[in-house]
Amino acid sequence: MEDLIAIRRYLHQHPELSGFEMRTSDFLIKEFKQLKTTQIIEEIGGHGFIVIFDSGMEGPSLLFRSELDGLPIQESSDLEYKSIFNSKGHQCGHDGHMSILLGLGKQLAANPIKKGKVTLLFQPAEETGEGAEAVIHDPLFRDLRFDEVFALHNLPSFPFGAIIVKNDSFTAAVKSVVIELHGKTAHASEPENGINPAKAVGEILKDIEELNINEPEQANFKLATLVHVKIGEPAYGVAAGDASIHYTFRSWTNEKLAELENEIIEKATAIANNNQLRISHHFLQRFYASENNPESVDLVRKACEKSGFNLIENSTPFKWGEDFGYFTKKYKGCLFGLGAGLNQPALHHPDYDFPDQLLKKGVEIFYAIIKERLE
């Protein structure tokens, strides 16, 4: 545990942003090369890599995933191992997730599995929603077979070391959109000679706000959050001719998200047409809902019970996105939570630091899942 804590703190001190995780990946690969593994495959989906432990005997093939990337956040803590980089930090706890998976690798190297195969995936670019998709479509990964896939995420505000599970959607389906309105500029003294998008922007904001059902306990939960609006330029002799509106929107299932997407675009298009504006749009950062397979969740429940973990059944999905949904869309699997403590700062808070003592809990639950499935 002392070695694992030291590694976690090193990773915390040296975060890299999505798509630029080269040094993080190199550091971890060097650690794995000191262990007895079957195979290490590098540069998957960018700077991702996988480590394979193969018994050579027929049996289930399991995948466990961790993220490599940090966040564009300025850390506000006074930790002796705080980030050495400005505006880069591990305030989502991916430093802890990586260390847990490394600890699991050490456990598997010391106690080889008797049948089946276990693969550890270190995935890039989770925070931008690009990494899982890149990994899944990478030829180095595409032809590999997995019977079941697992991942955990540390969760502040839950009891320390508790395992949080839920059948079906564990996290929301999330997507972002940029809506562009194109009118005609005019002299500010003669706005009647232009087509100003301001009125249309106001109507779009009002109508999309009315779509929201921000009630997590409802199956028809849907939420479109305005994140940015820009109209014209700060040129005081010119009446605005263009505007852009940025939304992030979410729902509990991929199907419900598609319905909300259509509603947003239909309303914006109708308003633009009524105001003689041209309209265009493009989407960003898609996260599929992490749809947990009930059998995989039951496996986590059994592993939890046999290991003496506190098990919490969550009644609603979490409203944030997680790109593990790309994996559960293709494979049977489960994303579950690992309680980080009731009094912890929230995820993505500038002061968040993954608790060192949680590493042991993460390794234990992953190893218990392996034992339960393979033995």
Image: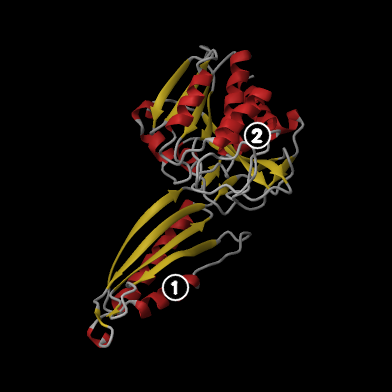
Question: Position of 294 compared to 140: left or right?
Answer: right
Residue for point 69% across, 42% down: 339
Task: Give the residue type at disc 2.
Answer: Val
Question: Position of 360 compared to 146: left or right?
Answer: right
Residue with the mark numbered 2: 300
- The residue carrying pointer 2 sits among few (fewer than 14), some (14 to 19) or many (20 or more) residues within 10 Å by Cα, namely many
Question: First in sequence: mark 1 or mark 2?
Answer: 1
| Image position, residue 284 (x, y; %) | 39, 53
In the image, which disc is placed on residue 205? 1
Q: Split into 4 quadrants, where in the image is the N terminus?
A: top right
| Image position, residue 50 (x, y; %) | 46, 25
Q: Split into 4 quadrants, where in the image is the C terminus?
A: top right
- What is the quadrant of residue 11 in the picture? top right
| Image position, residue 52 (x, y; %) | 49, 20
The Cα atoms of the two marked residues, 1 and 2, are separated by: 43 Å
* Count of numbered labels shown in the rendering: 2
196 in relation to 220, above or below? below
Element on which disc 1 rests: helix
Question: Position of 328 compared to 137: left or right?
Answer: right
Task: Give the residue type at disc 1.
Answer: Leu
101 in relation to 127, above or below? above
Residue for point 52% across, 62% down: 222
- The residue carrying pointer 1 sits among few (fewer than 14), some (14 to 19) or many (20 or more) residues within 10 Å by Cα, namely some
Q: Which of 49 and 185 is in front in this view?
A: 185
Element on which disc 2 rests: helix
244 in relation to 86, above or below? below
